[in-house]
Image (tube, rainbow, N blue to C red):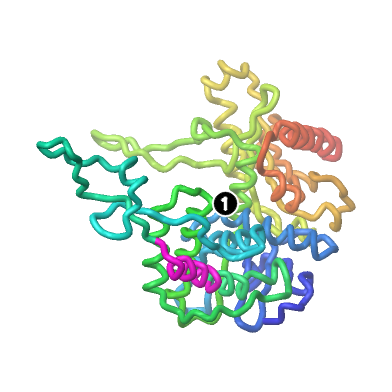
Amino acid sequence: MDLDARLLDRCHINKNDEGDRFVGIKADSENAMVYFPVGYQLPETDQEIRRDILHLISVLAEFTDKSDRVLAMKKFEAPQSVDFPINAYMEVINYYLEQNSYYTEKEPVFKTSDRGSIDWAKTIRKQRPLIQSDGSPVYTEYTVRVSSPNDKNLITQIHKYCVYESFQKLGWLFTPDLPPKPTIEKNTKMFLSVLNDKLARTNNDKNKHLFTAMIAVLKYIDEQTNLKQFYFGTDSFEYVWEKLIDRVYGIKDKYKFFPRTRWYLKGKVKENYALEPDSIMLHNGKIYVLDAKYYRYGITGNPMHLPESSSINKQITYGEYIYTQERFKREYGDDVPVYNAFLMPYNSAKNVFGFDSIYGNIGEAKGDWKVGDHNYERVQGIVVDIRYLMYHYTGNHKSKILRLADTIEQALHDNGQMI
């Protein structure tokens, strides 16, 4: 792998079209590439790009699971499920960089046993003896020293092996230099036995995290011996987009806003699955039905890349359901304030609309079967800066909710003037 290549040369912004949907990292022995979602604005310096790559990894780790990380292979071939333990690799690398050295045991390790090198001070303090008839104690188990210089050296050698493996795959994120190649021969079964034993006997949380990560790295190496490439990411970033939108703007108990249907049959009732909006946002006594659309319109400006009738009609149905329910009238008043919006990704630093803010309105969608007397019948098209959202999905979201609510309501007013 060319470790000297500039980070920018390793980055690609996907187009979210056929054959260019993957978001994440792909690498092999020759090259490594990072794929960002459509609309993402990369910074200019290697330091900032490195931070963005690491942040992309954290977003994918949080919002995807093994079932999401499926890569479409060649046509007619089965999808390939990828469970690369990227967090384990990062843990091994971060430990090495933070310590500026390999793991070494600084304290002797002890365990309870009926044989071995007895530490009498610890045995008397920790073990319970049997008291003989003459009053003298007899110990059936002792606290014994189990680590020796060779043991200490072994765990360090295993760590060297894991560090080298981790830097081969992901070290280019941090430095163009590889650490020294380990001298110990690969022996996965023995390595795992030693690490599992260490893990069972340590009370140090930092060491627990390291040993757990090393075990994951070794298991992955052992299972993936025939694969030259590794992947971490998803072909379905639309699910990440939906989760990001819901995390920032949505309420947790949105289920009570779901329109439900059922069959009334002769003698019984059959419940159907409810229609589920992506997110329900509440602000200042108003209800906002949000549909996260990971579509290309925010980047291309091509009307062919906008939500179509089925999505529009579904949004109007959500709004109408909420508006007509008596329980919401009791809570919000007879004229329940319901707003509708599609949220699509875009790049606020470079776009075809001339926008330069986090949010922008590109128009609204309506249905001919509605006369437009209610706000929810006019679905606002809102673009959201994708890089901003990926960096601001934690913490307090009140200010973001306020800005989005204002954008939707202002768009409703402005678009009403044009129609």
- What residue appears at the point 38 percent right and 37 percent down from the top-left corner? 262
Please check the rendered image and state whether residue 166 is part of the magenta-colored stretch, yes or no. Answer: no
Give 141 or 382, whichever is nearer the viewer: 141
| Residue 79 against residue 198 in the figure, above or below | below
Q: Position of residue 198 (x, y in %)?
A: 41, 59
Please check the rendered image and state whether residue 153 is part of the magenta-colored stretch, yes or no. Answer: yes
| Principal secondary structure, stretch drawn in magenta | helix
| Residue 260 against residue 230 in the figure, above or below | above
**Residue 144 seen in the current view:** yes
Q: Is residue 359 left or right of residue 277?
A: right
Q: Residue 17 is drawn in which quadrant? A: bottom right
- What residue appears at the point 82 percent right and 39 percent down from the top-left corner? 415
| Residue 263 against residue 37 in the figure, above or below | above
- What residue appears at the point 41 percent right and 62 percent down from the top-left corner? 147
Task: Identify residue for label 1.
Answer: 62
**Residue 26 seen in the current view:** no
Q: Residue 146 is drawn in which quadrant? A: bottom left
Give 49 or 310, whichever is nearer the viewer: 49
**What range is drawn magenta here?**
147-161
Give 351 or 260, whichever is nearer the viewer: 351
Secondary structure beneath label 1: helix
Of all residues, the one furthest to the front in this rendering is 134
Q: What amino acid is found at the position of numbered circle 1 in the picture?
A: Glu
Give 370 or 156, whichever is nearer the viewer: 156
Quarter of the N terminus within the rendering: bottom right
- What residue appears at the point 37 percent right and 73 percent down from the top-left corner? 189
Q: Position of residue 317 (x, y in %)?
A: 57, 38
Of all residues, the one furthest to the right in this rendering is 354
Q: Position of residue 134 (x, y in %)?
A: 12, 37
Quarter of the C terminus within the rendering: top right
